[in-house]
C-alpha cells in the first residue's frame, strides 16, 4: 500500500470512528500528505431560518478539513488541537452537495497552520478559513 | 410586555423555528437588547475522537449567540448575515452543560460587530469569539 | 495607456501621496485589476527587541497590499475601509528586502474580501493575511 | 520595589530599548501582571489618504499591548512570539492622542492568548484585537 492510500485509509477510519463526523455525514473523498478533500451533503437539518446552511456547519467542515490535513502530515505519536479558527463567508450556501479542501500551510514543531476552502456543487467558493494548531506529543493512553 | 420580555420571546421563537438550532438542542436562557445567553448540552454525539466537544460545535454556538444578540438589537425589517467569524479555543471542552453569551460590540448602518464567550458548567471560559456581520434591508418575502 | 498600466500608475500615485506609505518606504512593484505586488525594505528601525521585523509592520504591509488590490478593482466613486484583518505569522522576518502580494477574493456591493502574503528576498512565505472591507459610495469632497 | 512598580519599569526599559517602539512614539502608561496600558500620539505621519490613522498602526499598537501584557506575566527565561493577530476596526481613528490596553486572556505552557482595545482621547473604542502567542524557553544568548 503506497503512502497516499495509507493516508486516505487512516483518515477514513478516523472519520468513521467519530460519532460527531459520522453523525453529520462527512466523508473523505481524497487525501495525500498535508492535503484532504471532504464531501458533505447539506440537508434541511443544517439550515438556518433564512434557508441557508448555518455558518457553524461551514466552520465545522472547514475545521475538520484543516485538522485532517494536519493529521495526515504529523508523525505517529504526535497530536494536534485547534487553538484558533477564522472563517470568511463569501457567498450564501444552499442545501445540496458541498465539498471542502484542507491544506497544511506550515507544520512547525509546536505550532501548525492550515487553510480550508468550502465549495458548492458547481465548485463556487463559499467560504475560506485559516487555523492555528498546537502540536504536542500524544498523551499516554 | 416589556422590551426585555418581548426580546426573549422573539429569540426563543426563532430558535424553536430553526430545525438546525432545535436539532442541536440550543436554548435561550436570557436576553436583552444586544445581549443573549444560551445553554447547550454537549452529548457524546458532539465529541471528537479525543472525547472533547468538537471545535465546530463551539463555533456554531458562538456564531448563534452573536447572531441572536445582533438580531435583538436590529430594527424590524433589517437582516444580518455573518461575513467573518474568529474563535480562540482556550481550554478543552468536556461533555456536559455549556453556556454561551453573545454581545453586540458595535451596530453600524451597514456593518455590525459582536463577541461571544463559551463557558462550562463551572463558568470556566472555554472559548472566545468575535464576528463581523453585514446588515441590510430585509429582502421582500 | 492600457488598463494595467493605468492601474499601476494610479496605485503608485496613491502611495506617493500618502505620508504614511512613503514614510515607511513601501513601493508598488506590479499591479493588475484585483492584484498588487509591493516591495519593502525592512531596516533596523522596523525591528523588535529580538532583532526581527515587528509583526505590526507585517500587518501594515499586508493591509496595504489588500487595500490597494481592492482599490484597483473598485469603480471610480466607490471607497473601501478595512473592517477586519487577520494575520498568521509563519516564519520570523529578518531585516532586508520583503515583498507582499495582495489579491481580491470577492468584491461584493457592500463587502469585499482580500488576502495577502508576505515573502522574504528568497520568496519564502513569512506571513499570510486575510481581510474584510466595507465598500460604500465615496463621500462628497 | 513592589511587583507592579518592577513590571512597569521593566516594560518601560524594553520599549525604550526598541528602535521600533521608540521611533513610533509608544509609551507605557501603566502596567500590572498580565495588563498594560499604552499611550500613542497619532501624527500626520500615521495617516492614510483619507486622513485617518492607518489600520496597520492600530494593529501595531494592539500587537504591542498584547505582547507586553504577556511579557509582564511570563517567568524570566521564557519568551513569546505572535503567531496570529486579528483586529476589528470599529470606528475611524483621527489624529491625536490614542490609548491601548492589553490583557492576558490565558497563559498556557506552550500557547498564550491576549486581547487589546484601542481608544481615542475621549475613551471611545476604536478597535478590538485578539492574538495567539507561542511561548518557549528563551534561546541562549
Image (spheres, coloured by chain):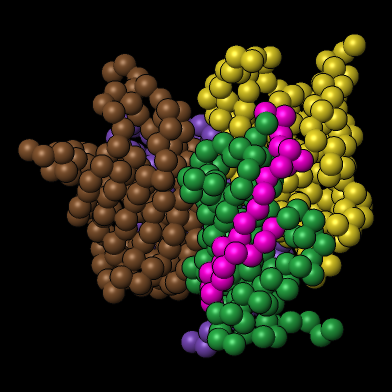
Chain colours: A yellow, B green, C purple, D brown
Q: Does A29 sit left or right of C44 as displayed?
A: right
> Quadrant of the image for the C terminus of chain A?
top right
**Image spot of residue C46 (x, y percent):** 35, 43
Q: Does D86 sit left or right of A26 as displayed?
A: left
Residue occupying the point 63% across, 68% down: B68
Indicate the quadrant where residue C54 lies: top left
Residue occupying the point 62% across, 75% down: B8
Residue occupying the point 26% across, 54% down: D37
**Image spot of residue B140 (x, y percent):** 81, 85
Q: Does C27 sit left or right of A74 as displayed?
A: left
**Span of residues in magenta:** B26-50
Instruction: Compare residues A60 and D88 and report the one nearer the observer.
Output: A60
Instruction: Indicate yes or no whether the magenta region holds residue B31.
Output: yes
Instruction: Please tell me whether residue C59 is drawn above or below residue C140 in the rendered image.
Output: above
Instruction: Compare residues A11 and A46 and report the one nearer the observer.
Output: A46
Among all residues in the image, which is located at the extreme left? D1
> Quadrant of the image for the N terminus of chain A?
top right
Please say whether residue A59 is visible from this viewpoint. Answer: yes
Amino acid at each position: 500500500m503506497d503512502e497516499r492510500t495509507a493516508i486516505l485509509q487512516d483518515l477514513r477510519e478516523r472519520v468513521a470512528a467519530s460519532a460527531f463526523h459520522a453523525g453529520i455525514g462527512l466523508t473523505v473523498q481524497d487525501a495525500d500528505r498535508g492535503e484532504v478533500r471532504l464531501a458533505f451533503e447539506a440537508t434541511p437539518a443544517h439550515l438556518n431560518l433564512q434557508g441557508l446552511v448555518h455558518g457553524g456547519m461551514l466552520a465545522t467542515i472547514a475545521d475538520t478539513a484543516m485538522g485532517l490535513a494536519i493529521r495526515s502530515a504529523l508523525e505517529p505519536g504526535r497530536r494536534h488541537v485547534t487553538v484558533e479558527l477564522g472563517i470568511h463567508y463569501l457567498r450564501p450556501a444552499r442545501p445540496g452537495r458541498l465539498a471542502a479542501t484542507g491544506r497544511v500551510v506550515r507544520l512547525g514543531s509546536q505550532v501548525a497552520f492550515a487553510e480550508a476552502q468550502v465549495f458548492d456543487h458547481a465548485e463556487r467558493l463559499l467560504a475560506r478559513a485559516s487555523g492555528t494548531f498546537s502540536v504536542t506529543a500524544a498523551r499516554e493512553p
